[in-house]
Image: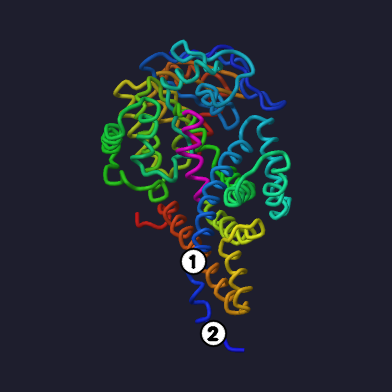
Amino acid sequence: MTFDLTILAPHIPFLVKGAVLTAEACVLALAGSLCIGTVVAALVTSASPLLSRIAYVYVDLFRNIPFIVQLFFFFYGLPEIGIYIDAFTTGVIALSIAGGAFTSDVIRSGILSIDPGILEAAEVSGLSKPTIFRKIVMPIALRTSVRPLGSVFVNLILTSSILSTITLNELTGSAKIVASDTFRPFEIYAVLLVAYACLTYLVSLAIGALHRYLNRDQTEAA
Amino acid sequence: MISVRGVRKAFGSATVLDGIDLDVHSGEVVSILGSSGSGKSTLIRCMNGLEKLDGGRITIDDFDVSRPKELSEARKRSATVFQLFNLYPHMTAVQNIALAPVEVLKIPRKQAEADARTLLDSVGLSARADAFPAQLSGGQRQRVGICRALAMKPRYLLLDEITSALDPEMTSDVLAILAKLAHDGTTMVFVTHEIEFARTISSRIVFLDKGQLVVDLPTAEFFAADGGMAKPRIAQFLSKMRKD
């Protein structure tokens, strides 16, 4: 058997289309999971036992159920009760909700690592609770959370390949079709390996840059 | 005026403040002395609303710090400087100082940052205005902490052992700033172990022991042989502090 990438040439536009779909789904899901994770982390660390309990239930629920089961429930289960959502939107929502559970846990640990004295200083200066969260808590929590958040986001990108199981022809779904058309799974999946590695490497680079920016006081010359 | 009436505070079974009465009038510098665990810092924390009272009442210009609706008004009138600085690590010195004026007093950001630079200049830190806390020495951080408190233009400054974490040279830098503030008529409640400094700048000295207010006397009277010094507990405390 020869390793011949040229046989993929006619399929490149189709694969690029799938890669774009993966990128779109991932960007939206990363934003969604960050929003959900931030809100849930705020609830978990809030003074309200009820809100904290509700948030914990969400985290435990979605962290402990296989993603494919959640995805099938949203895509195949919900139509049974009259809720129809297209495959792309379902994928983004499911990834956001599942990713949000992991993201909230990482942000929560970042929040809990903040020196309470800093929060007391903010409180006595008269800042409102939302302002303290926005201007003090989150920026400080992200300083320590950004690296583990990167791992969550990389995992989210890798998990996005499962969206091919709900008829979404994202990168993996497109590759499966091309593989069955060309009978050359070795070449196509080799390309897929490289494509996912590139995508996750880009996220790692971005996370590294964000980490350096958030912790610039530790590295910049005094 | 800061009015403290019958304040009680306990942590579990340990009573930390036991019926404290104290008034701080405008323009006064009141030093609170006492050994570790006497309740000095807890009293300051009760004054700024960080600790919930178990009994009694504290008002700042008639705003009750125990009532959530009045606490924000009380906090607009007072500012606290902490022992361990508690600066926001992700913000520069200027940003640390300008944050509350922008968010609470609604001063335009440019104006607040210009005011912050003026304050930093007044404490000899104009060259470090854009440095982060991690890039400052302990004394410099505490000076930023004082500027952050002053930026809110408070009527009352609450200072909680603000030189305890500093070496002698840094301590003298910070005390010089407090002496200037006292000279300018800033009202201060000052928890300290710096006995001689307290003697120099205070109008009154309050001595706490085991959560109780032992004496509240004008400074000269506190250090007089027939005044505070006549009390064995105070004489013992001062003798020990001077040896240390």
Q: Is A142 included in the stretch rendered in magenta?
A: yes
Q: Are labels 1 and 2 on one chain? A: yes
Residue with the mark numbered 1: A16
Is A164 rendered above or below residue B59?
below
Chain designation of label 1: A
Q: Is A36 included in the stretch rendered in magenta?
A: no
Q: In the rendered structure, which segment of residues is drawn in magenta?
A: A128-143
Closest to the observer, B160 or A174: A174
Chain designation of label 2: A
At label 1, counting other C-alpha atoms closer than 10 Å, the crowd grade (few under 14, some 14-19, many 20 or more) is some
Is B70 rendered above or below residue B153?
above
Relative side of B162 to B143, left or right: right
> In the rendering, at what x and y percent does residue B33 appear?
50, 26
Residue with the mark numbered 2: A4
- The picture quadrant where one finds residue A26 is bottom right
Quadrant containing the N terminus of chain B is: top left
Q: Amino acid at mark 1?
A: Val
Q: Amino acid at mark 2?
A: Asp
Could you say whether the residue bearing mark 1 is in a helix, strand or loop? helix
- The picture quadrant where one finds residue B155 is top left
Camera sees residue B64 = yes
Is B88 rendered above or below residue B66?
below
Relative side of A76 to A30, left or right: right
> In the rendering, at what x and y percent does residue A48 appear?
65, 29
Camera sees residue B161 = no
Could you say whether the residue bearing mark 2 is in a helix, strand or loop? loop
Q: Main secondary structure of the magenta part?
A: helix
- The picture quadrant where one finds residue B107 is top left
Q: CA distance from mark 1 to mark 2?
A: 19 Å
Is A96 rendered above or below residue A158?
above
Mark closest to the chain's N terminus, 1 or 2: 2
